[in-house]
Amino acid sequence: VTGRERLLIIGGDAGGMSAAAQARRRAPADRLEIVAFEKGDYTSYGACGLPYYVAGEMDDPEELVSRTPDEHRSQGIDVRMRHEVIAVDLDARVLRVRDSDAGADRSEPFDQLVFANGAEPIRPRLPGVDAQGVHGIQTIGDGIALREHVVKEHVGDRAVVVGGGYIGLEMAEAMHERGMLVTVIDAGPQPMSTLDEDMGALVAAAIRKIGLELQTETRVQAFETDEDGHVRAVVTEHGTIPADIVVLGTGVRPNVRLARDAGVKIGPSGGVKTDPRMATSVPGVWAAGDCVETFHRISRRPVAIALGTYANKQGRVVGENATGGYATFGGVIGTAITKVCAYEIGRTGLNEEEARDAGFEFVTATIESTTRAHYFDGSPEITVKIVAEKRSGRLLGAQIVGREGAAKRIDVMAAAIWNEMTADEFVQLDLGYAPPFSPVWDPTLIAARKAAAMR
Amino acid sequence: VTGRERLLIIGGDAGGMSAAAQARRRAPADRLEIVAFEKGDYTSYGACGLPYYVAGEMDDPEELVSRTPDEHRSQGIDVRMRHEVIAVDLDARVLRVRDSDAGADRSEPFDQLVFANGAEPIRPRLPGVDAQGVHGIQTIGDGIALREHVVKEHVGDRAVVVGGGYIGLEMAEAMHERGMLVTVIDAGPQPMSTLDEDMGALVAAAIRKIGLELQTETRVQAFETDEDGHVRAVVTEHGTIPADIVVLGTGVRPNVRLARDAGVKIGPSGGVKTDPRMATSVPGVWAAGDCVETFHRISRRPVAIALGTYANKQGRVVGENATGGYATFGGVIGTAITKVCAYEIGRTGLNEEEARDAGFEFVTATIESTTRAHYFDGSPEITVKIVAEKRSGRLLGAQIVGREGAAKRIDVMAAAIWNEMTADEFVQLDLGYAPPFSPVWDPTLIAARKAAAMR
């Protein structure tokens, strides 16, 4: 009736709402209608903040929300909460949407469409996995349930975290700080499998020092439940671990069922295939966030990595392109950081296994240093590992484990890797030095110097 | 007699001893004799650590020494302490050296020579500047004298720091922490003149909040002394300030008298002119550290900047080249960071005035953010300012003022500026994100996004 174009968005989190916001900035409401469908209760929330909500950094889960539905609406974006898109017809260009409150379905026509329906947790198909007390850690609902349990139960209760990745360890710390006895189980030889084994061993030592129990090379076989259907133990190949609560930190995969069923091309990594403008295989259909496959600049391979920073950037690119602008997403290099109590962990680029897989020959250099001048009391230690291409010396990846001031040093390595600098070139960089922040040779420079000498 | 080559080094601090160490690594002692002459009492000390010695971070000034004369000797480097080189004859290739202990002069022939005699403090030629209680802040001797005074005198004594640059402010903090009443006087409109005035104003507000007295746009005219010849007040154009102790943070200039008298070319910035291999205008004669002129990669102009990180790198380059190797120093972009109580300051590249001087047209973008997710209690604030070239959007400079986690963020900006990235390209960077370290959009990315939109 209005003659306005219609841009529909599936998913109201980082990717979708960044797309909506950027499109709104560029196109007036009388020219473009923007509607986002979110099946849950929140928009634009940071799942990465859930461990801090469980730990009690803040008491209101709404604080994890960077923009509420009403805030989006006041910007001229129509947000439909508890609306699940159940089918996509790309020929008719119409969505089938279920309104959970009204219990009714409706058809919604569109001119352009954005898939931003995120990732789904990988739940191991094991006996008892659906028992009460076995929690995921993806939605605010997960966080609320987990925190309620943690707060209600007595201190000293036993928690088991399955999967020693970023969010698994962060959640383990949160529960540990709440006074629970926490065991982390990981199938690999070390936790934090995006690090090499030698660097993962430092993480293992750190979290054991903190007081967390850690069982590596241990696969979960089942979850035992009590007569009420509540989990009471985790059965592993090496024995049974009592558990009052279980947290599944077993990763996520792109949520692509809708897109695949609609005929949108899915890439080899399992995410929606996108070009640099975040266009899918179907004209006028875009994708952003955890559901997409993007490009790894160093391995030159398609990858699907669920990360809020990527979702935000990709969403902006979609919003620009869907309104006649031009923007591209430059791909990723897999930078990630985390903090477990006093310990900080960072990684970027390719680790040894990834470099090998990608066909590189390489050298590695690992150094120990501190993040302040040595004469400061308790100057925090830091270990930096660099993976550099043989002969060229080009930086391929870096890993950091240390204490205060360690993790964010990954950024300068990420900028260097992004720019394809060699270790030799990196050593020349004019980095900030002052005794409270660094030895005269920054630890990253010392590592690069060593790598440069090895190639 | 031995047939060995002789490499002599004037100055036993960072530049000279890095050259010596690298040369020693590459050339065996039976082929190359290395002798360093140091007129003072210490080798390889970090002058940048002096404020922390005065503040009491450590009690032994030797802790500022990264390698003692004996440690150098054990590596096969002949270090002659309290030996001052008083003349250089480049035709005869011989040094005239004064042994302060023996009170005798000696001639020392050389094959290759390294000027590494550092910088000299700029002492304003004002009445009373040589009074007792007026201290420099360059040598460990300065630091010891200053600390003795600070510790001996009563708390509540008045200190005046002339010059609100890095080391002036660091020393002001140190004395403030020791319980003194500290006034900082600066001739400019704001302290920290390597920042733009708007960013300097943030520093001014911060140091006033800490409890330091600050007088800007104030020129010192004289130092009043008591009958014992001890300073008792600082006379300025705006009045007289009582002072029990005065610290001169009025900067340094390259120490080039010896080199100039010997016929070595001095550059327009006032430092010894060097090529990328750190060779001077005379074959077989090298230079490293605070006495040299080097190249600013963004302004493309010769500059003389006294900084330990440059001295270390340049020294290594000299040690490589003096032993038949090949290495170059890549120039500088003027990165610097500091900490004053809880406040952190960083800068890199060109500020507005420097960019204008260098002939650039530019835009600036300034943003306020935090260094952790907003929901952390007291998430530290940070202000980031970017100077970017008009039209191209190329990053020319960045400045940061903030609290915990702020200053070292300058490194990623430095790496980007070094690589001539545009603001648009910077926004794509894959930087580390986790709630304890950053909002989802790192403050540096937010600033670059704003700059990209302005150009």
Image (spheres, coloured by chain):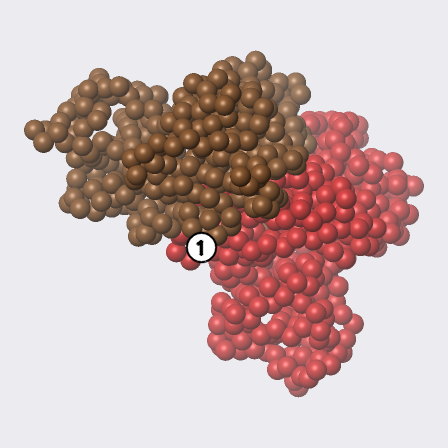
Chain colours: A red, B brown
As displayed, is residue B82 above or below residue B191? Answer: below
Of A348 and B45, nearer the camera is B45
**At x 66% / y 63%, what residue is drawn?**
A198
Q: Give SS at disc 1.
A: loop
Of A450 and B109, nearer the camera is B109
Farthest residue in the front direction?
B1
Q: Which residue is mark 1?
A: A379
- The location of residue B140, given as percent across then percent down, is 33, 41
- The location of residue A26, given as percent across then percent down, is 69, 27
In the rendered view, does B261 fall on the left or right side of A71?
Answer: left
Query: Does residue B117 show up?
Result: no
In the rendered view, does A297 fall on the left or right side of B218?
Answer: right
- The location of residue A340, given as percent across then percent down, is 55, 61
Of A385 and A233, nearer the camera is A385
Of B349 and A20, nearer the camera is B349
Q: Name the image quarter holding residue A280.
A: top right
